[in-house]
Image (cartoon, coloured by chain):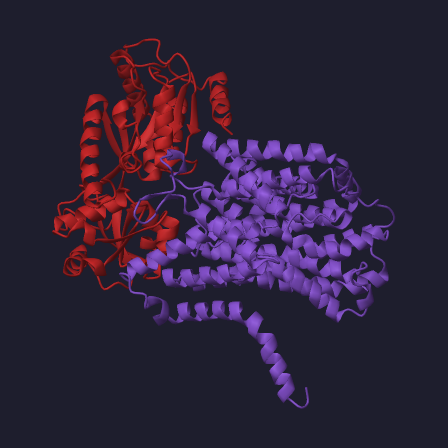
Amino acid sequence: MDVLADLLGGFANALEPQYLLYAAIGVTIGTLVGVLPGIGPALALALLLPLTYGFDPTGALIIFAGIYYGSLYGGAITSILLNTPGEAGSVATAIEGYPMAKAGRAGPALATAVMGSFSAGIISTLGLTFLAPLVANLARNFQATDYFALMVLAFVSVTALVGTSVIRGMISLFAGLFVGLVGLDFLTGQQRFTFGSAQLLGGIDIIIVVIGLFAIGEALYGLARLQYAKEQAVEFAGRIWLNREERSRVWKPWIRGGLLGFFFGSMPTGGSEVPTFLSYNVEKRLSKHKGEFGKGAIEGVAGPEAANNASFSGVLVPLLTLGIPTSATAAIILSAFQIYNIQPGPQLFEDSPDLVWTLIASLFIGNIMLLAINLPLVKLWIRILAIPKTLLYTGILVFGILGVYSLSGSITDLLLVCAIGAAGFFMRIYDFPVAPAVLGAILGPMMETQLRRALSISQNDFSVFFTRPLTVGLLLVALAVLVLPAVLPRLLRRVKRTDPVG
Amino acid sequence: MRWAVPLAASLLVLTGCGGESGGGDGSADDYPSQSIEIMAPADPGGGYDQTARSIGRSLDEGGVIDTGTEVYNVPGASGTAGLTQFVGENTGNPHQLMVIGKILVGAIEQTDSEVELEDTTPIARLTAEYDAVVVPADSEYETLEELMDAFEADPGGVAWGGGSVGGVDQILVAQLAESVGIEPAEINYIPYSGGGELTPAILSGDVTAAASGLAEFQDEIDAGDMRLLAVSSEEVIEGVDAPTIMDAGYDVSIANWRGVVAPPEISDEQRDAVVSMIEDMHDTPEWQETLESNNWDDFLLTGEEFGEYIDAETEDITQTLTDLGIVD
């Protein structure tokens, strides 16, 4: 098979000593940063992006993938021991993981998370291997109208992120959309919201938004909260390995979580929030130990953590084949590609097959490395949790600001990141979700571009959105995703009532 | 990794790769007395960056100078951020060079940059790349003439794809339109951020035709996925199976050139020394190999003549951008 030959070629590259070393560096740094409370994969990547300068593109992306996976594994440790998930994707892990740790079963909880991540990582990378070339082939025929419909679909998913208050979520989303407007209008060259500053002509880099909201905002919030909340890491003692009963309980959730994570990750709606919570609910429903849920059920750690890890390879499908980032993390990886003048999209698999397949092969290798360094070294990683919070948060502030400066050397960018950070701080205090703002800033400009391109090509004839079958199909799916969650329960109830058997 | 280049350079010097003694041809004997710093006003990876690094490498490895080179990047504002910094910080310093090109001329107009190319000291134009006019392989247009006839009949009906707004590609399309009497306002030009975005849009049939750097399309042309109708050079390009736009009957040619400038207020002797250093660089086998491997046309023009060329380009491009309504 073609794909297998390509993948083997990728392995031949990825197994070169230098790339193995890069992968090892990536997963180690990733785990180290991921263990720090409050730092999720997106922030880890944004902070560490400057480190990859000077590597060749393949090497840089291998390090990047390593950092990403490492920070996921590291994030599981913090979620379980400290109950402070660094990103939405690991919230579900903490629900059962933290009670397990409090009950003195931190070892098995961590082992489940690590091994579950490993199995799911392998499942989903296999999925990526076979699905991505197919999607890339399909995407060759995608026109601007289809891309626009995909963007609409992606935006609909934001509704899943708005949290408890729709108004707060929408305000956050629109703030992000506004940030995306700044800069030269790509179609006409007009300046928008640049206030005469040449530095703003190129727009506000997504990395600045991510570091501002996730690093500066979170660190300020963390520091402000220090005097109120005293978090205490759970003491880690006892065995790490799973016993026979636990083993028999976790392997199915691993596989189910892996499949869910990959499936939902690879959709244009993307992200890790939906599959992790879905996995949690599925495991709760299927478990023979329903009574343990909420008090430390091991299935509730195994499933979501597997789904979380698997969603990354899933997210790579639309990123690599369509150039659409469906999460903050994916947007940072897209920036990394662009730094090296590589545009992900349908052409990527043809233009840079070596890079793609080496990257995919390195995902397999990174997973194996993480399994190897995480289980034996888990006690070492836990020591990092002993770093005093004041030092940690000030450290994040310093590195965040240094990171921005090293990227651009621009004072304007420094002021921007501080302003966005201050906004992020107040958003956290008043309970505005941050994720919609980030996605708005990422996807807003892309959606505008595709919409206006489509209209420009059709000479402002809106019918193009209703005459192309693919476009109409995607728009209908988007409508369904928006409406069904509200309508379906009612319909089902009615069906039940009229159906005498049900 | 800004230190990587000077480190490599100093290693070269240490190992004696400096070769013959550097300097120019007599004038300003002690030039260069320190390392040459070359700015690329863009992110690593693009055309400016490649040009800057190739100049640095040819100066070092070609044995033109033995004081070393350093390349650094100042991205932002379509290159004008770099220009502003270059002119502001290096006045009178002949050891500073900056890579410029045709795209920067348009960008200066478009961004209302206060610093202009007039504020620099022209050294040399070095390379040119040419645009290709392509259509998808299954297009009904077999020749440029067929495409242009359709364009003339219904200007809005031909969706042209190309690079960023105000760039070389849009200027080419505008001049093509002008050559057959189409009003610039009627052109339906859709900008893409680069070949990676543009190529799929051509292959999917989104745009009718496209103009962009020949190198961007070479793979697809070779694979038979795109049809090459014409190239924008003045003479037929060796090994390229297509006429020039001029041979096809339209009085349009365009070269996407790049070159180097020095800061303002250096003396004439200093300028001559820099020019002669770049001329020596141009003659090195390293530079000739660079031209070959990148498919860059040798486009050397130095000193005051280059200055006059920049002035003419500025006037020409400003006119086209004004016609297009991009600048006022």
Task: Tell me the quarter of the picture where residue A291 sits.
Answer: bottom right
Q: Is residue A55 visible?
A: no
User: With respect to residue A328, does A495 lie above or below?
Assistant: below
Residue A155 as seen in the image, left or right of residue B203: right
The image position of residue A325, as x and y in percent, is 50, 53
Query: Looking at the rendering, in which quadrant would you find the C terminus of chain A?
Result: bottom right
Name the colour assigned to chain A in the rendering.
Answer: purple
Furthest residue toward bottom: A500
Q: In this structure image, what is the colour of chain B? A: red
Hey, which residue is sitting farthest right in the picture?
A: A238
Residue B132 appears in the rendering: yes
Q: Locate residue B312, reporting x and y percent.
A: 18, 32
Apparent side of residue A68 relative to residue B146 in the rendered image (left or right) = right
The relative height of residue A230 versus residue A435 in the rendered view (above or below) is: above
* Residue B40: x %, y % from top left: 38, 30
Quarter of the image where one finds residue B274: top left
